[in-house]
Structures are given as C-alpha cells and as structure tokens.
Image: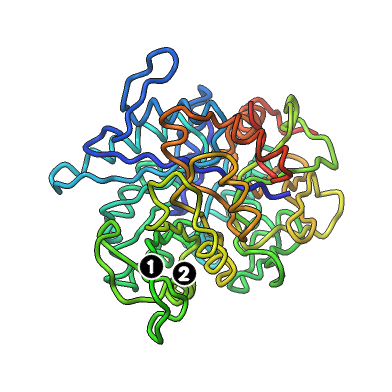
Amino acid sequence: MLSKRIIICLDVREGKTTKGIKFKGNIDIGDPVAMAEEYYRQGVDELVFYDITASSDKRDIIIDVVEGVAKNIFIPFSVGGGIRSLDDMHRVLAAGAEKISINTAAVQDPDLIYRGAMTFGSQCIVLGMDAKKVDKTPALPSGYEIYINGGRTPVGIDAVEWAKKARDLGAGEICLNSIDADGTNAGYELTLTSLISEAVSIPVIASGGAGTPEHLRDVFRASDADAALIASMVHYQHYTIPQIKEYLSNEGIPVREFI
Amino acid sequence: MIAIIDYGAGNLTSVARALEHIGVTCKITDKYEEILSSERIIFPGVGAAGKAMEVIRHRKLDRAIREVVAQKKPFLGICMGAQIILGESEENDTTCLNIIPGIARRFPDGDIKIPHMGWNDISVVRSHPVLEGLDGRTQFYFVHSYYPAPERKEDIIATTNYGISFASIIGRDNVIATQFHLEKSGRHGLKILKNFCDWDGRV
C-alpha cells in the first residue's frame, strides 16, 4: 500500500537553517546537512530545503548544501526558493536534488512549469502554492486566493483554478501552504486541503499549521493529501519522526517503516 | 568497474553518489568501449520513454546494451531502465530493446493518482540473489506513470499494488530491473545496490 509521506521542511538562509536546534549528541546547530542526516536516520520520507537567502550574490551557497545532503542521504529531497529559470533548476538537480519547487516564479511566468516539465520531467516539478481564505467572488469562486512573495502579495488568482492550470502545464505535485494556518501550530487548513487535493489528480502535500501528530492524522482523514509537511514540531524536538509515525500507524494511516 | 549508462537523463549522478556511499567505483559513460569493458552495467533514469530510446539509438547504446547482456554481465535497470528493456512502451508509442518481452503500460485512469509517487511495499514472488538480506518491511520510493508488464510470468520477481498489481521488479538471467528508485529508497535501496555489485549474474 502506498504510504502517506511525512516531509520535513528546512528553511535555509545563507547556508544555515533558520530554526537551528541542538540534537542529542551536539550535532552542529543550524547545519542543514547535519539536520538532514539526523532526520534521514529517524526515518523521514522526504525533505524540502527552502532557500530564503535574500541577497542574490549568496545564492550559490544553497548548491553547496544540496551537494552535501545528496552525498549522505538517500531519500528524495526538493529545493525551493529563488528558482526562476531552467538554468536554476538544472543547477539544483545536477547538485543532487530530486525535485525543484517553484512558487512566485510560476505565477509570474506559468510557462516555466511547462518548460521545466518538458526538460526535466513532471516528476521534478513541484508547484508551491500559498493560499489565503477570502470572500467568495466570481473571480475567486473557491474562496481561496493565491499569494506570492512569501505570502505577502495577493495576485487575484483562485487557488483551485491555479492548481488545475499548474497540473495542465505539467506540474508533478503541489505543495499547498495555507497562509492562515502557517505558524499557528493549530492544525492544517482542512477545507483548503480537501478542495485542492480533490480538484487535481496529482499528489498534494499539505503544509502550514502542523503542531501535533493529531494534526497529520486529521489532514489525512479529511482530505486526499498524499503527504504532510512539518517543520517546527520536529525542529524544536517536540516530536521525533518515529513518534509521529507510530501515532499515525496506530490511527490506521499507512506510513513507511520507522525505527 | 561499473558503467552507468549515460543517455542524458537527470539523475545519473544520484546513482553514482549512492554507489560511492557503499564504496563502489563507477563511471558514467556513453562510450561503447567503456561499457563493453566494464564488469557490470546500470541503466538508471527518469524521463519519457520516447526521448530515452531516441538518445539510446542516436548514441548507439542499444548495441552496447545488447552485447553486454549477451555476454551475461550483470545488468541492472532502474525506473526507466525497467521499461526500455521491454519490447515496447505505451509512452510515446515507443519501440524498446526487447531484452525481456513485454510492454510498459500506463496506469489506468480512475481512483488512483498518476504518477504513482511515494513509498510503497513490494511482494517478492521469486527469490533472487540481489534481494537477499532485506529485513523488516520492504518499502521503496516510486515515481512513475507507466509500469512494466512482462509477457512471461517467470520474468516477474516482485509485485506492488497501486490500484492494480504490477511487476515492480522484473528479471531474467543476468538482467534485473526495479521500477522503484534504489538510489532514493534509503537503506533497503542501498542494500539491493550492494547486492547487485556482488552478484555474478547467475540466478
């Protein structure tokens, strides 16, 4: 049976994770490669590195991180943030990433999804989507609007329409982040996740709001999400991957083997 | 020396990194002499069958592959490598290498999401030297929209359920191929890679 994937997101700025924490055994604080190795050892199914480096001249640092990770962990991982062209995609994939995630660049240039899928295959192209609940209008019939620039700028595009368009353009997967739920630790946005995961036939990753294993159970029960993105609940060591998987397994959610 | 056949696909380096990690030397190559002189061969890959076969023919890799297979050298296909060794693929209506008779079929539309992406179980239906020593639950990482459907039941080594039951490992004589990504399947994937590197090609 296909397992529900647990994916850990690491925000990386100039080569260091922004939620640096200290693992048992004093592994380097904030070293994304060391953190990736620890999560790999714990049995995470996949990783996402999100590059939030602001200055463009320090962008190359993420490539070093990707190479370091690719040498030591043998599960899929994707990289997002600052990818705007086929060249950017090629560099990240050649450094060892399995997939690349595009968000703002895809809204500004939807054809980038198509070009990426044609060049590297749909399985490489993840559409990152930031959506926020709004009043339903004829232009926004689902009641969820797409935002860009890290969730700061509304663009007047309906979330469900955008998901379908991205699928048609060749996106292989959608990482769906709820701006309302993000950072709350109060659970995923279940309505939004159901809407999107039922509207498209490609895999959907639920993102934003995870604080406890119950939240993952809830999103897998309430929607067709294939994967759940988590961050602070493991970075701050409130839970380990085996604890989360054991809980989900006991709740009848199919998960991959854990330690 | 292991030759990883270079037909321009994106993830060749992932396989090379996994081999490096288990202490095996390899070379990514599209040169006939290097492929023929290597001790064993890996054909990895992602992408579309039509494009893959086009490059294979253009670089005359089909001849090299047929010869090493005929020489009984251990040959491992991964993902696309499990499909192009069949007779044909429904993807882009492609004529493939026909090392193992059969077709790469598209998953039927319906209740399942396509591509089949994520970690899934395998059931071994025929024991094989490269599958020895796997412990615990054998789950592997899959990403594909087409699956191998060999003509002969004897060529099926393991199956996986995704809407339908399909052959997730196929093999005959010195040829073995996994639909899932060994290089992205954690310790189980590395174990099969290691077993392949120690395999003499006999079953």
How many other residues sit within 10 Å of disc 1, few (<14), some (14-19) or many (≥20)? Answer: many
Marks 1/2: CA–CA distance:
6 Å
Name the residue nearer the viewer: B25 or B105.
B105
Q: Is residue A227 above or below residue A62?
A: below
Q: Are marks 1 and 2 on the same chain?
A: yes
Looking at the image, residue B66 sits to the left or right of residue A145; the answer is: right
Name the residue nearer the viewer: A248 or A81.
A248
- Say if residue A215 shows up in the picture: yes
Q: Quadrant of the C terminus of chain A?
A: top right
Q: Please give the name of the residue rendered at 51% of the width and 42% of the height, measured from the top-left corner.
A: A46
Question: Exactly how many numbered labels are in the figure?
Answer: 2
- Say if residue B57 shows up in the picture: no
Q: Locate residue A19, reporting x and y percent.
A: 33, 33
Determine the secondary structure under disc 2: loop
The three-letter code of the residue at mark 1 reads Ile
Determine the secondary structure under disc 1: helix
Q: Which mark is residue A155?
A: none
Looking at the image, residue B153 sits to the left or right of residue A234; the answer is: right
Numbered disc 2: what chain?
A
The three-letter code of the residue at mark 2 reads Gly
Residue matched to label 2: A170
Name the residue nearer the viewer: A110 or B65.
A110
Q: Please give the name of the residue rendered at 53% of the width and 29% of the height, measured from the top-left corner.
A: A240
Given contact means CB atoms under 8 Å apart, are the residues at marks 1 and 2 in contact?
A: yes
Q: Please give the name of the residue rendered at 46% of the width and 40% of the height, measured from the top-left corner.
A: A8
Which residue lies most toward the bottom here? A138
Q: How is the image coloured?
A: rainbow
Residue A11's quadrant in the figure?
A: top left
How many other residues sit within 10 Å of disc 2, few (<14), some (14-19) or many (≥20)? Answer: many
Residue matched to label 1: A113
Looking at the image, residue A118 sits to the left or right of residue B98; the answer is: left
